[in-house]
Amino acid sequence: MNVTEAQARLNQLIDQDSFAISRHGKIVGVYLSRDRIEALIETMELLSNPEFLKALKAYRTGRMKLYDIEELDKAMSA
């Protein structure tokens, strides 16, 4: 949306997760909600963790064993 529209609708827009503002057809600003920013920070932190990257690679290549929650509950209580 353009700057004029964003100014007129700001109260409604801030309830959205994200939106871009353009001027003369070019994006000049981006709004990200607090939840979206926190999620991005968490993702960056995970991707900077070598152990997480190792687990992610194992998952993607099918080398990670997945367990059903009921199986884990039974195994933990035995």
Image: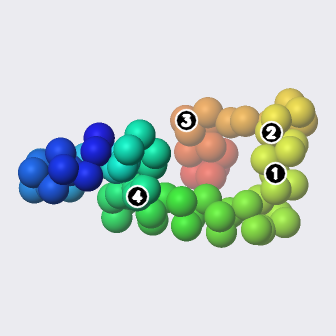
Q: Nearer the viewer, mark 4 or mark 3?
A: 4
Read off the residue under disc 2. Answer: 59
Local crowd at mark 1 within 10 Å, few (<14), some, or many (≥20)? Answer: few
Specify the label residue 55 is tagged with. Answer: 1
Query: Residues under labels 1 and 4: Cα distance?
Result: 36 Å
Which SS class for mark 3? helix
Mark 2 element type: helix
Q: Residues within 10 Å of mark 4 (few under 14, many from 20)?
A: few
Q: Is residue 75 visible?
A: yes
Q: Position of residue 53 (x, y in %)?
A: 82, 56
Residue nearest the observer in this picture, 8 or 51: 8
Q: Residue furthest front?
A: 24
| Sequence-earlier tag: 1 or 4 | 4
Task: Answer with mark 4 or mark 2, whichever residue precedes in sequence.
Answer: 4
| Secondary structure state at the residue bearing disc 1 | helix
Label 2, label 3: how many angstroms apart (C-alpha)?
20 Å
Quick check: marks 4 and 2 in contact, CB under 8 Å?
Answer: no
Residue 68 in picture, x, y percent from top left: 61, 33
Q: Are marks 1 and 2 in contact (CB under 8 Å)?
A: yes
Which quarter of the image is occupied by the N terminus?
Answer: top left
Residue at which label 4 appears:
29
- Between marks 4 and 2 in the image, the one whose residue lies nearer the viewer: 4
Query: Depth check: 53 or 10 in front?
Result: 10
Query: Is label 3 or label 1 in front?
Result: 1
Q: Residues within 10 Å of mark 3 (few under 14, many from 20)?
A: few
Could you give the CA–CA distance between mark 4 and mark 2, rounded to whole angstroms? Answer: 36 Å
Identify the residue shown where x is 49% and y is 58%: 39
Residue identified by numbered label 3: 70
